[in-house]
């Protein structure tokens, strides 16, 4: 094997995974160090999922050393640990564009590379997808291997267990790598574990076991009984000394636990797994943030991180007031202080959803259910039925996973569950899997649901207060960005279904929801400079709509422009257009501005908003064009 040149990066020599097999283990160790440095320096500039990727460097190298991608299929659960995979599958030169508009994604994307077998971004899907590939392989008479890499956190989701259960039932050739980065390696790694793994995967052992059972069963009268006793004894001993019996009961052969940073050992175990028929589970222990001390000390902070100083790990601090998430966190704590019935639920995102202070102050009223959004929603329904006031804080993109529970377990029973829908709208650099662009469409169609969106910090606080007092299902959607305005010291209820007229004008009416209200106000200023006077309405509610204001101003102006940070299909603009059509105002022109019928790529929020025409200048131009005025160059 080659060890690489003494000068220059080994990584520059890796154009495809096959190049790894020309390196010896010492060279692979050097390569791992180079990869960590590249990941740290790149994410320091672009932001990204740092700690998960640092933890799977050796694991990824060993997988690609043993398995022949793209012929063999490797699926990364969630996908936020795929940076190493990208670096060794021909994307080193593009890696500097990570998560930038027009650059490579932070998640696997089949459009990007043949080595990205399956698009991922939400958790706990890998085993299901891998089993589907294994079934397709067998029906086509092919013989490639399929590997799913799933984290211990992703195993908290029911979908992962459903897939494990089905895989064990079908007994397809499939390898599941359990990347466990939360538990200590020391108690479970040793000579006995290694010996038992080799023993249970050695073909001679399997043939010997089958021969003994065959001979015992030939003994007249007592043979089968002796065989059953031996089997029971064998199983009892295995429960005492063999880890992973849970997976064995599901129909998997269990290999591990394995040190996930020991490349020679990983290669040996993966080779065993490759040669062993049926479902295999390889249990690997890794350290999140491995090799970068700031991430090792604080893996949660560096799980998904913005730009930082690579030499110190110090995060870049941007100016401005609190984020919407921070306003939510402070408000829900204060609400809970005043009402002991308020409880908070999150699905493995206590920091991301702003609930850390709540968890510290009210530990008995805080519930982190893990990656289990469906359970979170129905748990909240049960709490509401029991007289509590549950607040379920979930990112918009992840709330999609619990749609049936929202309908069946909450809204059908009209239970007072409050949904704090964080990361609504364009999220940015994480891309298509994480944009919160569908929640209005799937929430506003459900009976009994009230849907709100604040334009600033004060409205968010007041809407949360209002939602907890409604006595019915309510959702408050807010973005990932700083909240303009100040947080009120006292709350005021927001009248349900009442909009707010911020500006009056005769030429058109801009009806904006949430984050688009400041955009509408800025567009109105631009238009006023051109002699066009528009009304600006802060809708506040996507459901129920303020029919009085909307019908009045539509009739007065004859032109309604709706603004939303959401897909146009089924969104807020659709609701307004439906209202006007139902009321016979077909002569009123409706222009809907939002996101088109597409999955929005990764890139900064500002760049994406500009690309899709959700800026004051673009809105003003649209109004001028709709009024038949000559379009002019506008400057905010």
Image (cartoon, rainbow, N blue to C red):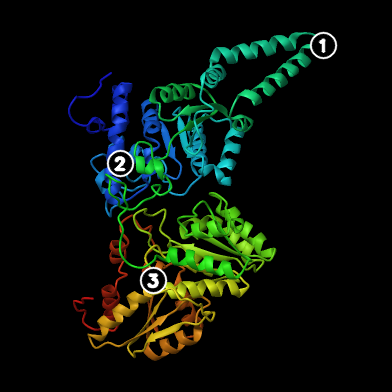
* Sequence order check, earlier mark of 1 and 2: 2
Q: Locate residue 278: give its quadrant.
A: top right
Q: Is residue 51 above or below residue 390?
A: above
* Sequence order check, earlier mark of 3 and 2: 2
In front: mark 3 or mark 2? 2
Q: Name the residue under label 1.
A: 221
Taking the image as shown, residue 32 lies to the left or right of residue 245, namely left
Label 3, residues with CA under 10 Å away: few <14, some 14-19, many ≥20: many
Residue beneath the point at 48% across and 85% down:
584
In front: mark 1 or mark 3? 3
Image quadrant for the C terminus?
Answer: bottom left
Numbered label attached to residue 515: 3
Numbered label attached to residue 39: 2
Q: How far apart are marks 3 and 2 (CA)?
A: 33 Å
**Visible residue check, residue 195:** yes
Q: Mark 1–mark 2 contact, CB under 8 Å?
A: no
Q: Mark 1–mark 3 contact, CB under 8 Å?
A: no
């Amino acid at each position: 094997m080659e060890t690489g040149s003494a000068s220059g990066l080994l990584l520059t020599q890796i154009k495809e995974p096959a190049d790894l097999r020309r390196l010896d283990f010492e060279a692979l160790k050097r390569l791992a160090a180079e990869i960590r440095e590249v990941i740290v320096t790149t994410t320091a500039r672009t932001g990204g999922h740092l700690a998960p990727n640092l933890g799977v460097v050796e694991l990824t190298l060993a997988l690609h050393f043993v398995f022949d991608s793209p012929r063999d299929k490797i699926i990364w659960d969630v996908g936020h640990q795929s940076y190493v995979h990208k670096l060794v599958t021909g994307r080193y030169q593009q890696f500097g564009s990570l998560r930038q508009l027009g650059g490579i994604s932070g998640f696997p994307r089949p459009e990007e590379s043949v080595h990205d077998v399956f698009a991922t971004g939400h958790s706990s899907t890998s085993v299901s997808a891998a089993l589907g590939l294994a079934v397709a392989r067998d029906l086509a008479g092919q013989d490639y291997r399929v590997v799913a890499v799933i984290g211990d956190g992703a195993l908290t989701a029911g979908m992962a267990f459903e897939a494990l259960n089905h895989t064990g039932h079908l007994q397809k050739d499939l390898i599941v790598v359990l990347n466990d980065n939360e538990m200590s390696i020391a108690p479970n790694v040793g000579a006995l574990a290694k010996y038992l793994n080799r023993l249970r995967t050695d073909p001679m052992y399997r043939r010997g076991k089958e021969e003994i059972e065959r001979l015992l069963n030939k003994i007249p009268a007592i043979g089968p009984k002796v065989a059953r006793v031996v089997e029971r004894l064998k199983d009892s001993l295995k429960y005492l000394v063999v880890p992973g019996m849970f997976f064995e009961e599901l129909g998997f052969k269990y290999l591990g636990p394995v040190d996930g940073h020991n490349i020679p050992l990983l290669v040996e175990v993966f080779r065993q797994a490759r040669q062993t028929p049926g479902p295999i589970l390889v249990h690997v222990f890794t350290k999140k943030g491995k090799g970068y001390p700031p991430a090792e000390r604080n893996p949660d902070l560096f799980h998904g991180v913005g730009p930082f100083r690579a030499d110190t790990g110090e995060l870049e601090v941007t100016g401005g007031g609190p984020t919407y998430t921070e306003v939510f966190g402070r408000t829900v704590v204060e609400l809970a202080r005043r009402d002991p019935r308020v409880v908070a639920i999150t699905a493995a995102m206590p920091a991301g959803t702003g609930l850390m202070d709540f968890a510290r102050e009210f530990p008995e009223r805080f519930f982190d259910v893990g990656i289990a959004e469906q359970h979170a929603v129905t748990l909240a329904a049960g709490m509401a039925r029991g007289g509590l006031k549950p607040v379920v804080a979930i990112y918009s993109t992840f709330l999609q996973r619990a749609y049936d529970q929202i309908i069946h377990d909450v809204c059908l029973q009209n239970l007072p569950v409050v949904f704090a829908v964080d990361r609504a709208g364009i999220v940015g650099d994480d891309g298509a899997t994480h944009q919160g662009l569908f929640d209005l469409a799937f929430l506003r169609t459900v009976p009994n649901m009230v849907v709100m969106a604040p334009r600033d910090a004060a409205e968010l606080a007041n809407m949360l207060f209002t939602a907890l007092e409604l006595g019915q299902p309510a959702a408050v959607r807010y973005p990932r960005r700083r909240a303009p305005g100040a947080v009120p010291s006292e709350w005021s209820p927001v009248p349900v279904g009442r909009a707010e007229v911020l500006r009056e004008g005769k030429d058109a009416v801009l009806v904006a929801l949430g984050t688009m209200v400041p955009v509408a106000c800025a567009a109105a200023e631009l238009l006023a400079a051109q002699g066009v006077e528009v009304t600006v309405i802060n809708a506040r509610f996507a459901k129920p709509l303020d029919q009085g204001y909307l019908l009045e101003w539509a009739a007065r102006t004859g032109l309604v422009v709706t603004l939303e940070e959401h897909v146009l299909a089924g969104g807020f603009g659709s609701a307004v257009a439906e209202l006007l059509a139902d009321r016979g105002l077909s002569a009123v022109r409706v222009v809907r501005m939002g996101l088109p019928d597409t999955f929005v790529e990764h890139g900064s929020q500002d760049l994406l908003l500009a690309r899709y025409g959700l800026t004051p200048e673009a809105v003003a131009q649209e109004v001028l064009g709709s009024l038949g005025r000559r379009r002019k160059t506008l400057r905010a």
